[in-house]
């Protein structure tokens, strides 16, 4: 550290003093020309503009340094522009000097230590110190105070020179008051800082008691009392000159209180909903939050189309439906505890040795549930399937989804029950990988649109085509539409896929209109899209972009999809009809719709599921069902489209029954658009030469 001297202002002070121009009051007992050590203090400082490690000492000029005692006035300014503690002494220019407050206090007390910092006691008010303008005092303006026997501090109060500080609890004030308060602190016996460790250790002890898993019964009261103690105890301690740093301890204690409160709140949340308010059964929450293993077999019972059934019922009748379901389920569960899940799922635990005998119970329950359930003057036939998870080495919370997945797989395969197979996880991983590749497959052309022609049975003319999404995977080859469409629906990709099919269908449909202005294109719409107005914008964009008339577009919606979304779906379908788009009820006969719901859908076409067409030639009952369905559609003002025409005989029978349009492998399999366009062009040429 280097040393430099400031001489101009202080030299002027010496010159004026030597020439007698500067007059001191007589009560200062100053004898001109004599040194005044211990009575006059000259400040040494340091210039830290070059960095704290490179501080440059700023010393009084040598010509005046001998006239007084050199002290320091250094202090660290905190972020709040104030000073919390100050040092007894400082090192300047390689030499230790007492601070001004230590030098002043030493005149009154011999107990001052010069090797420590101490907190400033701000209970001394700056307003208790008399202060005057030095300029007016020297110029003998106004009242001149009696300074005899007084300690006088001279300083400036200009904010330009950094002479304003925040005094704790007192506001902004000139920094000359800080040495005065510091001196009074020492004169009053000094202060002592215990630091942050005592409060932090106290908070740590209480926090450990709360977070260690062995919470005392009254931990909440204990933590609150500790918090109040930490907030209130410093007041009497500071009155005794003992200071303590609370912030780290307070942060730790409050954090522990929040953590414990969150744990207890979470536990209450886990226990909430323990009883289903409609069925009165315990819910699966107890298992869902249970991480321990259980040696018992976990069984899942899944009721198909449960949410669709509930959506058709008034709210008051849901309890009646569940009473029937629970009553039938109890016949197979016996004394075991039945747990109620979501969306028509039920669970129970049973001993491993009962699994073999339970197979007959599963089949018996399935037969019982095939008997219609009558609720609110309506009759519902429900299917039930069972899934079993016997991996007892896994936590129950993980086994729930496995048992449910097995029940869902049993329903898909048409079996009564199924045991969860861990090896099937590979198929699930494949489904997730499909999701990651779906967007790229659309952009790269691996997903394309096939078209299946629709024939007018009376004239055997091709009058339209259905657009069907197809995926030719690079490594796996063709992927079934049911596989990747379900993935798209479950993971929010169905909108992009549908927009792709719509744009392609309206584009090629515009080509067909050049040969046949009445040609129509059909596109399937997922139930997921009937919950948002995005479908309206999607259809408008596709029609506008390709110049395709709305009346030539048919959107196919399953009866179950329209019913699942309720009034929102009906409102969107009505808006599409107002645009001129035709609507078709797809896969009719596979759902559970009533005449009331069929009438509420603003459809122009009824499309009968292929299972009825394929058995038409061999079953008199199916012929009667088909005939009555065609007559019902005509009575409601709708055309009829029959799927699944596999033989010429089926085509003939449907034509005789009055079915207008047919579709199936006998007419044409799904193919590329060029093949369909060739069929249309050839057909028009035959008509032209006809």
Image: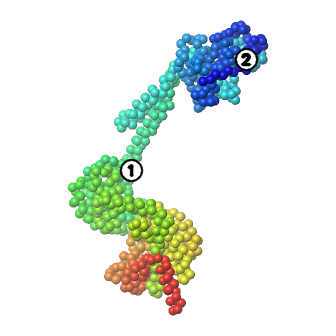
160 to 73, vertically: above or below: below
Q: Residues within 10 Å of mark 1 (few under 14, many from 20)?
A: some
The numbered disc on residue 11 is 2
Residue at the disc numbered 1: 273
Q: Is residue 650 above or below residue 314?
A: below
Q: Residue at x 53, y 71 (%)?
A: 503
Residue 532 horizontal/vertical position (percent): 51, 63
Front-most of residues 142 and 32: 32
Q: Is residue 76 above or below residue 323?
A: above
Secondary element at tag 2 = helix
Q: Nearer the viewer, mark 1 or mark 2?
A: 2
Q: Residue at x 48, y 68 (%)?
A: 445
Of residues 482 and 96, the one drawn nearer to the viewer in this rendering:
96
Residue 124, by quadrant, is: top right
Q: Residue at x 29, y 58 (%)?
A: 388
Tell how many labels: 2
Q: Return the residue nearer the eye: 366 or 521.
A: 521
Residue 36 vs residue 381, the one in the foreground:
36
Q: Quadrant of the N terminus?
A: top right
Q: Position of residue 658 (x, y in %)?
A: 43, 84
């Amino acid at each position: 550290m280097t040393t430099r001297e400031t001489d101009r202002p202080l030299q002027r002070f010496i010159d004026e003093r030597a020439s007698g121009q500067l007059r001191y009051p007589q009560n200062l007992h100053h004898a001109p020309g004599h040194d005044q050590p211990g009575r006059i203090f000259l400040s040494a400082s340091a210039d830290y503009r070059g960095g704290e490690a490179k501080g440059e000492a700023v010393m009084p000029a040598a010509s005046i340094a001998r006239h007084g005692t050199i002290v320091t006035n250094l202090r660290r300014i905190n972020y709040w522009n104030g000073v919390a503690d100050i040092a007894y002494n400082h090192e300047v220019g390689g030499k230790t000097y007492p601070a001004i407050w230590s030098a002043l206090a030493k005149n009154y007390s011999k107990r001052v230590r010069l090797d420590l910092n101490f907190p400033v006691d701000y209970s001394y008010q700056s307003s208790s110190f008399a202060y005057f303008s030095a300029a007016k005092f020297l110029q003998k303006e106004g009242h001149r105070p009696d300074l005899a026997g007084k300690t006088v501090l001279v300083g400036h109060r200009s904010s330009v020179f950094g002479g304003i500080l925040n005094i704790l609890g007192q506001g902004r004030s000139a920094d000359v008051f800080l040495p005065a308060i510091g001196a009074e602190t020492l004169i009053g016996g000094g202060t002592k800082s215990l630091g942050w460790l005592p409060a932090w250790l106290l908070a740590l002890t209480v926090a450990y008691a709360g977070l260690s898993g062995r919470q005392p019964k009254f931990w909440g009261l204990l933590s609150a009392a500790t918090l109040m103690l930490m907030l209130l105890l410093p007041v009497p301690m500071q009155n005794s000159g003992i200071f303590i740093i609370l912030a780290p301890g307070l942060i730790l204690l409050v954090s522990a209180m929040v953590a414990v409160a969150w744990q207890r709140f979470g536990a209450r949340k886990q226990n909430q909903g323990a009883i289903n308010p409609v069925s009165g059964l315990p819910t699966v929450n107890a298992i869902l939050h249970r991480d321990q293993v259980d040696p018992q077999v976990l069984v899942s019972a899944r009721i198909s189309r449960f949410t669709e059934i509930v959506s058709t019922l008034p709210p008051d009748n849901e309890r009646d439906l569940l009473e029937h379901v629970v009553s039938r389920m109890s016949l197979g569960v016996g004394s075991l505890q039945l747990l109620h899940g979501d969306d028509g799922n039920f669970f129970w635990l049973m001993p491993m040795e009962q699994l073999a005998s339970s197979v007959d119970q599963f089949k018996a329950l399935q037969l019982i549930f095939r008997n219609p359930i009558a609720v609110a003057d309506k009759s519902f036939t429900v299917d039930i399937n069972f899934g079993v998870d016997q991996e007892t080495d896994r936590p129950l919370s993980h086994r729930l989804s496995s048992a449910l997945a097995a029940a869902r797989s049993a329903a898909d395969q048409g079996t009564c029950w199924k045991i969860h197979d861990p090896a099937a996880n590979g198929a699930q991983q494949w489904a997730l990988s499909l999701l990651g590749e779906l967007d790229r497959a659309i952009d790269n052309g691996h997903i394309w649109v096939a078209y299946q022609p629709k024939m007018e049975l009376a004239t055997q003319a091709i009058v339209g085509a259905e657009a069907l999404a197809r995926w030719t995977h690079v490594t796996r080859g063709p992927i079934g539409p049911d596989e990747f469409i379900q993935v798209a629906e479950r993971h929010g990709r169905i909108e992009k896929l549908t927009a792709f099919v719509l744009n392609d269908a309206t584009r090629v449909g515009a080509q067909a209109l050049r040969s046949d202005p009445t040609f129509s294109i059909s596109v399937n719409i997922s139930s997921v899209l009937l919950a948002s107005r995005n479908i309206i914008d999607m259809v408008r964009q596709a029609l506008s972009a390709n110049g395709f008339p709305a009346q030539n577009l048919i959107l196919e919606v399953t009866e179950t999809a329209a019913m699942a979304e309720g009034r929102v779906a009906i409102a969107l379908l009505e808006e599409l009809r107002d645009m001129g788009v035709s609507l078709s009820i797809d896969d009719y006969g596979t759902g559970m719709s009533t005449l009331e719901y069929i009438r509420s859908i603003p459809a122009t076409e009824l499309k009968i599921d292929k299972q009825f067409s394929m058995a038409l030639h061999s079953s008199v009952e199916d012929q009667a069902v088909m005939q009555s369905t065609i007559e019902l559609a005509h009575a409601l003002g709708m055309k009829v489209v029959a799927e699944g025409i596999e033989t010429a005989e089926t085509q003939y029978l449907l034509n005789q029954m009055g079915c207008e349009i047919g579709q199936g492998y006998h007419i044409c399999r799904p193919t590329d658009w060029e093949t369909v366009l060739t069929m249309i062009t050839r057909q028009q040429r035959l008509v032209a030469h006809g």
